[in-house]
Amino acid sequence: MIALKLILEGLGLGFLLYLICAIGIRNGAIGMVHLYDQKVQERVVQLGLTTAEEVRKRSVLFRSLCLPGYLIYVLICVYVINGARGFFAGFWQGFVILFIMNLIDRFLIDEYWIGHTKAWIIPGTEDLRPYITAEDKKKKWIMGTAGMALLAAILSGIMALMLK
């Protein structure tokens, strides 16, 4: 039963990520250019499609609202809904949720949506495609696996200390 809950919670977090991306590109992919490679960001500024300051603001907004929101979501799922106690229970549940979200990000968002649709194309930057290079994908897989495990360990360590 817990495995099904974790899968659904991971899918829910993946859906939140998708929703944030969809809202971010609702007026064009330029709205999420802060997630693109530095060369793409420089090109859109050079083309006058946005400013470096606007890219910086969107990046700060994304990091200050979305990332803490994801962590709060995981903590609520693991400790409030699922009732986890102790380091190991919190760690594995948090990791499963984060890893499922990572799979959604890698396959559905990065590989399919960004890589195979026109939704994320920014006019004037087509020569810089693929926007997510093989090297970027490698880094994202490492961070999405090891990074999510580390994040789950930190969260569960903090919660284990707080719930003593």
Image: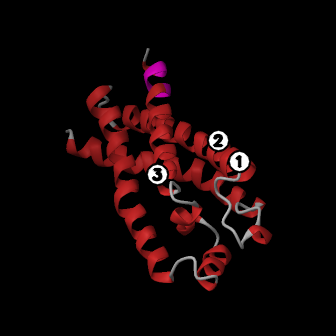
Residues at marks 3 and 1, CA–CA distance in whole angstroms: 19 Å
Q: Taking 138 as reference, is 11 left or right? A: left
Q: Quadrant of residue 44?
A: bottom right
Q: Secondary structure at mark 1?
A: helix
- Mark 1 — residue? 111
Q: Taking 142 as reference, is 53 left or right? A: left
Amino acid type of the residue that numbered disc 2 sits on in the rendered structure: Leu
**Depicted 118 relative to depicted 95: above or below:** below
Q: Which dot marks residue 131?
A: none
Where residue 25 appears, as percent x and y from the top left, is: 53, 56
N-terminal of the pair, mark 3 or mark 2, is 3
Residues at marks 3 and 2, CA–CA distance in whole angstroms: 16 Å
Point 48% across, 56% down: residue: 24
Amino acid type of the residue that numbered disc 1 sits on in the rendered structure: Glu
Residues at marks 2 and 1, CA–CA distance in whole angstroms: 6 Å
Amino acid type of the residue that numbered disc 3 sits on in the rendered structure: Ile
Please state the extent of the stretch shown in magenta in the rendering.
3-7
